[in-house]
Image (cartoon, coloured by chain):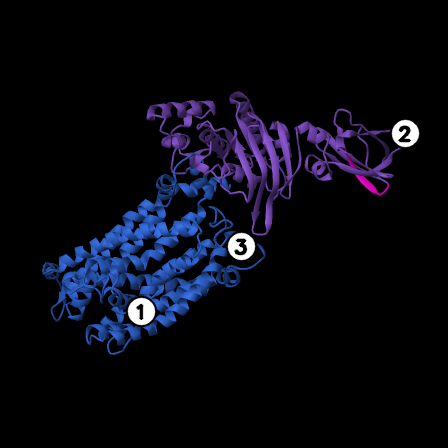
Chain colours: A blue, B purple
């Protein structure tokens, strides 16, 4: 239930993306040929969005499989692969066994990954042609009857549950239960001063560093993959995409094993945590970069060269400014995931340098729900703030797109 | 000769896009590369601009072999088909961008040069305008100014008018021809539009399947097409078999008359085109088209038997 609730939002974003990619003329054509809205959904919209829905479903599946924050806190006596491998490392210091367990998670994850790449190809079919939106005044698309009511109730139910969830988190932070009633209190917030603020600001610092580094590396990578089609660029693309789909626990254990010995002893340092977060999110940065680059006319780059500008300045003056939206998207993504991640980094942080999520995780495990809720709120609010500020920046008209659309009119 | 293409050849895998091309271009000449899509004209342009490396052959400019020079090192600039303006820069930044990395221009000198250029293409009032807010014709002028400001030895134009509407196309074409006359710049112009090529070129290079079919002045090519392909591609042509010999004749070179000329036919269709009317006339088993100027047209009817005269 908890897993479903937390994955619905991500799946919705994915599926909305796919739905927006469907040529609206297809829907108009269907209705023009006499199909009712219900039939249109069944025969045109759903088949078109099929790949997107399947991909979203599988991503949710893998994420749930690898997630252990949720089950360890509310899972009770049920055992999960990810939590078991966590306890094997932390509780019994049995690294080989934990690795073996993580490999078990890896198998379905790899299957999904192959599936995902296969279906992503289909998705691209829909994204390039035709008009994407209904023009204002055009007949919209309204469902009528019991189906509409049912879908409406479902949607509202979800929204209410989501709101309740956040209200509860917020409420727990500023109340305590005295046996009869919930009473307002600031004691949880005051308790934060025992080293907890430190981990919160450490989280922010890690997230900022990871966000900026990831975006730079990812965008450069996408540039080399898209524009300098060198031999092996496909393979590099594949390798760079892997960390995203590999379960976090697996990734974390891998880092312990890789950096425990010479030449690079990094276990217990800050660098290893940041590196881990960077490499997990590079795929998103490079995909965002690729999306902008494929929409960008290569002639623009040629034009700069043609004017006698040295290559390095072409990248600085032309490529980087135009990749700005991709940079922002990737920054938001990395910042958010680094702020909220538990699975991958719980193994590799040193006890003296905890991050907010791990701190929260520990307080919850100790039963200090109030303090846990305060940390949760801090994470939510800071992430939300960054998201809002940067979304605003993205919404500024993208010059590359503006020129393209004028050009094709 | 100013610009020489010698045995220029480009192969992609097994496809030969341009095969053994030899063209000599004089200084200040405007030469069009004309042909159907896929004939190799854009590939040729890219090899001259340095964006593609020829498989064989040479590009020689002003006596210097530039075949292996990078595009940024060539004294050649291009007006791209999509204009390829930098969308994050305004008009004057776009136009001045190429000067930024030339040491001989101080900031002040560069600014003056940009102003001068914008004045020439009539965009002085739009200097600070975002290029994405300009109309198609204005964007075209920015692209043109941006390429010309570097005083290139050769200016390449890759179907520069293909994104403009018909009226604007004619206007821009006149502007560019005038500008070219004024500053005496050597220009190579790629197009698939025969009317465009005829109207502005000093010479036309007709290409098909990667090879040159004919080179000549517009008039030369229109009146003396070397073969059926050229005749068909430049304007319309009737292929009429008269006994042993085959006659290639333009529709405007046919007159309809009631006097006996020895060639008798029947009108099976007519289309009013404004300045002229096209009559479809059946002669034996063949159908020819005749364009009759609206001034001399005697309004022949469909089904009427007429005599035709070749002029």
Boundaries of the magenta span? B284-290
**For the residue labelled by badge 2, is the local secondary structure a helix, a strand or a loop?**
loop
Q: In which quarter of the image is residue B172?
A: top right
Circles 2, 1 touching at the beta carbon (< 8 Å)? no
Which residue sits at x=59%, y=33%?
A: B166
Q: Vertical placement of A250 versus B274: above or below?
A: below
Q: Which one is in front in this view, the residue at disc 1 or the one at disc 3?
A: 1
- Residue A228: percent from left, percent from top: 43, 49
- The answer to whether residue B288 is magenta is yes
Checking the image for residue A102, the label placed there is: none
| Residue that mark 1 sits on | A66
10 Å crowding of disc 2: few (<14), some (14-19), many (20+): few
Q: Which of B116 and B216 is in front in this view?
A: B216
Q: Is residue B169 left or right of residue B252?
A: left
Q: In which quarter of the image is residue B22?
A: top right
Which residue sits at x=41%, y=28%?
A: B126
- Residue A191: percent from left, percent from top: 10, 61
| Residue that mark 2 sits on | B260
Mark 2, chain letter? B
Q: In which quarter of the image is the N terminus of chain A?
A: bottom left
Mark 1, chain letter? A
**For the residue labelled by badge 1, is the local secondary structure a helix, a strand or a loop?**
helix
Q: Is residue B85 visible?
A: no
Q: Which of marks 1 and 3 is nearer the N terminus?
A: 3
- The answer to whether residue A340 is magenta is no
Q: In this view, does A71 lie to the left or right of B162?
A: left
């Amino acid at each position: 239930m908890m897993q479903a609730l937390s994955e619905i939002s991500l799946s919705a974003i994915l599926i909305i993306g796919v739905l927006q990619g469907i040529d609206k003329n297809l829907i108009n054509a269907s209705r023009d040929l006499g199909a009712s809205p219900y039939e249109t959904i069944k025969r045109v919209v759903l088949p078109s969005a099929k790949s997107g829905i399947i991909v979203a479903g599988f991503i949710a599946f893998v994420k749930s499989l690898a997630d252990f924050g949720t089950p360890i806190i509310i899972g009770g006596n049920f055992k999960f692969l990810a939590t078991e491998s966590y306890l094997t490392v932390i509780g019994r210091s049995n690294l080989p066994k934990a690795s073996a367990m993580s490999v078990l998670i890896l198998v379905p994850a790899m299957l999904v990954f192959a599936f995902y790449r296969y279906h992503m190809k289909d998705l691209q079919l829909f994204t390039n042609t035709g008009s994407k939106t209904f023009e204002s005044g055009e007949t919209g698309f309204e469902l009528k009857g019991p189906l509409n009511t049912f879908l409406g109730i479902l949607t509202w139910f979800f929204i209410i549950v989501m709101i309740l969830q956040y209200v509860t988190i917020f409420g727990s932070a500023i109340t305590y239960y005295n046996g009869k009633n919930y009473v307002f209190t600031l004691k949880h917030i005051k308790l934060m001063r025992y080293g907890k603020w430190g981990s919160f600001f450490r989280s922010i610092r890690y997230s900022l560093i990871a966000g900026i580094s990831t975006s730079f590396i990812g965008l450069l990578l996408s540039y080399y993959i898209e524009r300098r089609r060198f031999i092996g660029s496909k393979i590099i693309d594949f390798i760079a995409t892997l960390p995203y789909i590999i379960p976090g626990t697996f990734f974390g254990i891998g880092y312990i094993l890789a950096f425990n010995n010479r030449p690079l002893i990094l276990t217990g340092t800050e660098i290893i945590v940041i590196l881990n977060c960077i490499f997990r999110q590079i795929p998103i940065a490079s995909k965002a970069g690729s999306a902008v680059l494929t929409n960008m006319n290569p002639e623009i780059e040629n034009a700069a060269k043609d004017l006698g500008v040295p290559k390095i300045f072409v990248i600085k003056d032309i490529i980087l400014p135009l990749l700005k939206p991709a940079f922002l998207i990737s920054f938001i993504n990395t910042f958010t995931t680094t702020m909220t991640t538990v699975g991958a980094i719980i193994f590799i942080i040193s006890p003296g340098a905890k991050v907010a999520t791990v701190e929260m995780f520990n307080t919850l495990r100790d039963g200090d729900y109030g303090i846990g809720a305060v940390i949760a709120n801090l994470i939510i609010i800071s992430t939300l703030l960054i998201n809002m500020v940067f979304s605003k920046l993205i919404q500024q008209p993208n010059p590359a797109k503006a020129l393209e659309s004028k050009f094709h009119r | 000769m100013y610009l020489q293409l010698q045995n220029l050849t480009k192969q992609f895998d097994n496809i030969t896009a341009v095969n053994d091309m030899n063209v000599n271009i004089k200084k200040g000449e405007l030469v069009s590369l004309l042909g159907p899509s896929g004939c190799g004209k854009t590939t040729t342009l890219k090899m001259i601009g340095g964006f593609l490396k020829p498989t064989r052959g040479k590009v020689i400019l002003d006596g210097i072999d530039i075949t292996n020079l990078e595009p940024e090192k060539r004294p050649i600039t291009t007006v791209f088909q999509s204009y390829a303006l930098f969308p994050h820069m305004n008009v004057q930044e776009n136009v001045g961008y190429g000067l930024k990395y030339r040491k001989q221009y101080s900031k002040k000198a560069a600014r003056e040069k940009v102003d001068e250029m914008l004045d020439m293409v009539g965009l002085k009032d739009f200097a600070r305008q975002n290029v994405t807010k300009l109309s198609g014709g204005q964007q075209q002028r920015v692209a043109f100014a941006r390429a010309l400001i570097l005083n290139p030895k050769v200016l390449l134009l890759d179907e520069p008018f293909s994104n403009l509407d018909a009226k604007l196309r004619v206007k821009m074409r006149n502007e560019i021809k005038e500008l070219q006359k004024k500053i005496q710049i050597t220009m190579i112009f790629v197009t698939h539009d025969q009317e465009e090529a005829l109207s502005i070129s000093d010479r036309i290079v007709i290409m098909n399947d990667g090879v040159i079919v004919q080179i000549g002045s517009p008039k030369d090519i229109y009146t003396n097409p070397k073969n059926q392909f050229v005749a068909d591609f430049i304007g319309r042509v009737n292929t009429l078999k008269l006994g042993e010999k085959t006659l290639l004749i333009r529709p405007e070179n046919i007159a309809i008359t009631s006097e006996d000329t020895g060639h008798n036919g029947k009108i099976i269709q007519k289309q009013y085109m404004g300045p002229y009317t096209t009559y479809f006339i059946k002669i034996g088993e063949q159908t020819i088209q005749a364009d009759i100027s609206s001034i001399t047209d005697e309004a022949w009817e469909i089904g009427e038997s007429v005599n035709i005269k070749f002029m």
